[in-house]
Amino acid sequence: MTFIPKGLLIMSVLALAACQNPDRYGSGGAGGAGGAGGAGGGYIDTTGLGDPNDPSSIAYFNQSVGDRVLFGNDQSTVSPEGRTILMGQANWLNQNPGYAVIIEGHADEKGTREYNLALGARRAASVQQFLISQGVNGGRMKTISYGKERPIEVCSEESCYTRNRRAVTVLSVGSGV
Amino acid sequence: MKPSIRILPALLALAMGPLATLPAMAQEPLRIVIDQAVIDPMPVAVPVFVDEGGAGDLARNLSRVVAADLAGTGLFREIPQEAHISRIGSFDGGIAFEDWRAVNARVLVTGAVSASGGRVTVKFRAFDVVNGSVIEGAALQFAGTTDGWRRMAHKVSDVVYSKITGEGGYFDSRVVFVSESGPKNARAKRLAVMDYDGANVQYLTDSAAIVLAPRFSPAGDRILYTSYETGFPRITLMDVGSLKRQTLGEQPGTMTFAPRFSPDGGTVVFSLERGGNTDIYSMNLRSGGLTQLTNSPSIETAPSFSPDGSQIVFESDRSGAPQIYIMPASGGEGRRISGGEGRYGTPVWSPRGDLVAFTKQNKGRFHIGVMRTDGSEERLLTASFLDEGPTWAPNGRVIMFTRETSGDGGQAGLWSVDISGRNLKQISTDGPASDPAWSPLLP
């Protein structure tokens, strides 16, 4: 390590990272307030989402507005159905400015690991750009890609792949970044 | 304690061996040509090494690892010890070559081990049984620490392999990989290293954060990988000795991944994603300076330097689907080299410079393949539900990769195959494992 000047590299400060960690999947992850929407992903904490009957709760957003859009094979263009969901998300986010947003992009398992990371990032960015076009402040939003690392469905058939090719809008309390 | 090994000056007497009992008869040269389409494995006998004091189990264990290394290549076939007629009671005693010829051995590897105070000395000779002579150069002596005994066995094997095939060895090497556990929708991943054969596993991280696709530095002293430790995918540099790690080139609003070293170890090429677009960048590790190498609205990722450092092979979907391109190390458009049906990714330049290994996806199957650097002579070496991420053995003759099985119980494992397509086999690991990356041959 002696040949790398410390000033040029940013050390990860782990304690700080833990507070900001959006990885709600990681075993050590704190971060975002769920967003599973009953999808059955193993380790997702769904407590603290509020009353689904309260239209300003995260639970309402996840279940009634819809927290995710799905994509075609190797696609990152938002479908007409997806646009309807995202218009609902934008409307909700504009009425509830107290939430920060992380948009997660995901891919199915039929691709190489690093390409799928890039593909998931494209999907997340696609959703972010659409939400910005609908008036949501870009400063409230961050994106992250999980590639094929975090499927919600585990079968190796198209029925599962369809649900895994997704971008999920994950909310947390706070005005954003 | 870190195992250390040094090669002692080869003793002239060692190289000459015991007096041959028969005049050397003119025979076909003892040589395996790996490029041959079909290989009849060469029969090799590895009797238990002679205990010359304090060796205990080490004498037997060393000889077993040597036999496993050689037979594991598929180029040699072991004559089981039970079939041996002769015993090697003394390292410098006469060899009854007729006894070894009688059990059809073509090569005989004898050795002797002594140990005291945590130090081990190993000497060995490899004989051409038909000619009744020591194979030229295949007689050496190593000294090292007891905990490094497997490495000494691998060094013996590397010399024997290399003298008979004319290729460099690869047994005394390590593989960094991702150890996996947990269900498919909540996989826990840890960085680990092991010997090339799966022994001596050490974990480098805990499973608190997802880690992906590690790579060794050219000297084997550092590891680059992608980690979610900060919450977002970031390229991370780890010092293997101290396990200290640093996030490189952190820029808010971007994702960085797919890092690889340049051949001189001073530069990292990687993918940086901004606003959904992924391009390839390089970072000078001394200055921290960043250079953008590709500038395209498509995905550019999985860069890999040529061994001379002058070019980079990478993956891009600029044509509409992922294909393989080569550009100068300074960046540029690049020329496409993959031309077949299907999708191509994860190109890795071979250490010999002659081939590019890749992952190919076609008609619902995944393959590991190799092609020449102009894209010609594509050969697919494997086929399965999901094969990906080839890495080259230090001698450019063997490829290790990830194979994952399908379905809800799908699991990843490490497999290896010769560049001829022969000798496909799974590497034994404690649990599921993925993303192997081979180290250089250890010093």
Image (cartoon, coloured by chain):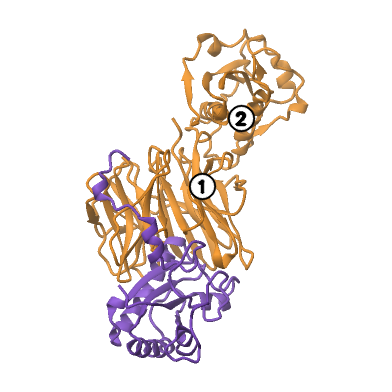
Q: Is residue A150 left or right of residue B428?
A: left
Indicate which disc, 1 or 2, sits on the residue closer to the N terminus: 2
Label 2 marks which chain's residue?
B
Q: Examine the rendering and report whether any part of residue B211 can be seen.
A: yes
Q: Toward which corner of the image does residue B55 lie, by quadrant?
A: top right
Q: In the drawing, what numbered circle is on residue B442?
A: none
Q: Which residue is mark 2?
A: B66
> Residue drawn 57% across and 49% down?
B415
The residue type indicated by label 2 comes to Val
Work out whether residue A74 or residue B112 is closer to the camera in this orientation and state it. B112
B260 is higher (above) or lower (below) than A21: above
> Residue drawn 77% across and 27% down?
B82
Check disc 1 and report its element: helix, strand or loop: strand
Given contact means CB atoms under 8 Å apart, are the residues at marks 1 and 2 in contact? no
B44 is higher (above) or lower (below) than A12: above
> Residue drawn 50% across and 92% down?
A53
Identify the colour of chain B in the image.
orange
Q: Which residue is mark 1?
A: B192
**Image x and y of residue B32, in percent:** 56, 32
Report whether mark 1 lies on the same chain as mark 2. Answer: yes
**Image x and y of residue B156, in percent:** 55, 26
Identify the colour of chain A in the image.
purple
Q: Is residue B15 left or right of residue A143?
A: right
